[in-house]
Image (tube, rainbow, N blue to C red):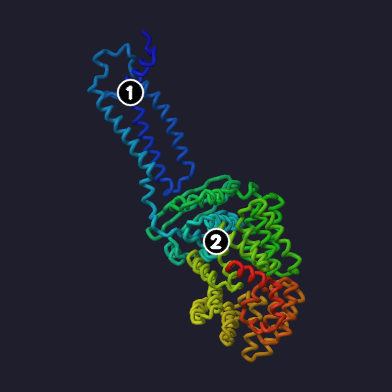
Amino acid sequence: MSDKPNNPFKFWQELKRRKVIRFIPVYAAASFVILELVDIIAEPFGLPDWTLKLVVVLLSIGFIISIILSWIYDVTPEGVKKTKPISKVSEQQKETGSKMIGWKITSYVSIVIIIGLLMVNIFGIRRQAEVDTELEKSIAVLPFNNFSEDSDQEFMCLGLTDEIITNLFKIKSFDKVISLSSVLTYIGTDKMIPQIADELGVNYILEGKYTKIGDQVRVSAQLIEPKHDKHIWQNDYDRPYKEIIVIQSDIALQIAAHIKTFLTESETQNIQKIPTSNLEAYELLQQASFLVTLDLNALDQGLDLCLQAIELDPDYADAYALAGIATLLKGCYGGGSKMQSVVWDATHYFEKALESDQNNGGAHFGLAWFNDWIKWDYIKAEKEYLKAIDLEPNNNIFNDYYIEFLLKRHQLEDASFYIKRSQEKDTMVNLDHLIGMHVLSGNKKEAYNSISLESSVEQAHRWVGENYIWLEEYDSAKIYLESAIQSEDPLMLIPRFQSCLALAYYKTKNDQQAQIIINQLIAKSDETSAGSPAFFTGWYYSGIGEVDSAFYWLEKAFKSRSPEMPWLKVDPVFNNLKEDDRYWDLYERTGHKAYDEYMAGLKK
């Protein structure tokens, strides 16, 4: 007689006799336990993201081998023996119901284990215990540490950090996302994570490492809840270097998922959007961002890198947006060229960015700057500021400049709302704007209280001096401005603070020193319009009551499209000019009257 079963029923019976059927649920349950165990320990032990896939492959291969072995061999009290053919098995040797009870119990237990693990996995009992959903969803992304041998990779670390933060800015349900400028102070710090979290006022910290070796990259990210010393999520991204472009969006989405943050479909799509598929263009833009963010003296180099990136990828929206911002900053504050010859090029870059990506927050923000600072179309500027804020609601830089816009328009109620919003979203609130709001609203007591906070920071002494100018406290202004000079604050050399020091000297009977500074500003205005030396010369003459000289220099500032002209409406120094018709003519030509009429129309 043949050993081979000759129909499906007999084959099934043979599978049961050889205990293959009993083996399958036991192996499945064991495999499930192994997979869950690997899933649990992968993050704390920093296992690569391909570990789980490898285990699945190994278990699948093991399953096939085990099925074959269970068909051929049997485990008996005497040891492992080859299973006898059915023709050689006596009736007494065939399995009885009593002998099968043990295997049945094992099979049932295995099935219960599988169902139990499925329930745990589906309902997330383990994972739900990791996060306190009542905690405020506030986070700081610390600058990634560069573990590459190449120190030039620092720009990639900063770029990676910046892009994760930018992606988190896009999620409205986050209560607070700390800006890049706030976390940069922690580069190389020896402070512990709980202390940093306490200083920044956040419940979650993301820290990471970046390592590039040849054409491979490892990005390690770790999400921590310092208050309870919990490691919420951890992963190592071992990828080809060319995939660095997509890692930051995955990290942002993982953060949102692990602290149970609600994302809309449009927010998810906006985060997942790949900015460019050209790795070289991406690298160039990270270098450009590194330079533009940290060094105004490197704007030319930053702009050149943006243009190289655009040449490699003509549809790279982020490159166009940064090129526009670099162009604006170069013309307004960078020096070396007439502002009118460069700033108008900025609109071209912003428009090209929006052609590629209509939801590019940086491009909308750049257009807001352009219409506010240069074109003096405050109606359009406000729409662009609000569009940028809508796209990146947690971006405190966007909020900060919109507050300044509102102060220049004397929209103090709205400014107060956004200042409070800014305080909730980040810890580094611009005290200068808060003080300005208090002065303009006549609340001098609160202004002095805020100045006392700002004066404790040596790097802010130039701002304190300017604030005292607004309050007409010229002795105090001189003390703080001179302190900034003594501390070698490089920004004291720009026209804005030089004119403040000149006015403080004049008002404290140091006329000769004041005139030396003003002569330097006049000479500088013949060389460049960057930094607005003509405007601040006019500002100074208004402050000392020389009205004709003030209007002469303000007209020169108007012709050079000074980005400071929007302050004409609210700066207390210009109160000396408001009884002169020339002031109201200039007021109209710089867009203030059109905005006033627009706002009056909205209130009807």
Q: Residue furthest left?
A: 98
In this rendering, position of residue 513 left or right of residue 185: right
**Extreme residue toward the bottom, this view:** 509
Q: Earlier in the sequence, mark 2 or mark 1?
A: 1
**For residue 550, above or below residue 384:** below
Residue 83: mark:
none
Residue 150 image offset from top left, x and y in percent: 60, 55
Question: For the image shown, how many numbered marks are present on the structure?
Answer: 2
The foreground one among 250 and 19 is: 250
**Dot 1, how many residues are within 10 Å of its Cα: few (below 14), some (14-19), or many (20+)?**
many
Q: Position of residue 55 (x, y in %)?
A: 44, 37
- Using the image, tell me which numbered label, if any, was put on residue 395: 2
Residue 416, horizontal then vertical, whole percent:
52, 71
Residues at marks 2 and 1, CA–CA distance in whole angstroms = 63 Å
Kindly identify the residue that appears in the image at 53 percent across and 46 percent down.
238
Residue in the picture at 54% in, 53% down: 210
User: Which image quarter: residue 430?
Assistant: bottom right
What amino acid is found at the position of numbered circle 2 in the picture? Asn
Q: Amino acid at mark 1?
A: Lys
Location of residue 308 (image quadrant): bottom right
Residue 590 appears left or right of 45: right
Disc 1, SS? loop
Name which residue lies at 74% across and 72% down. Answer: 560
Q: Position of residue 529 (x, y in %)?
A: 73, 72
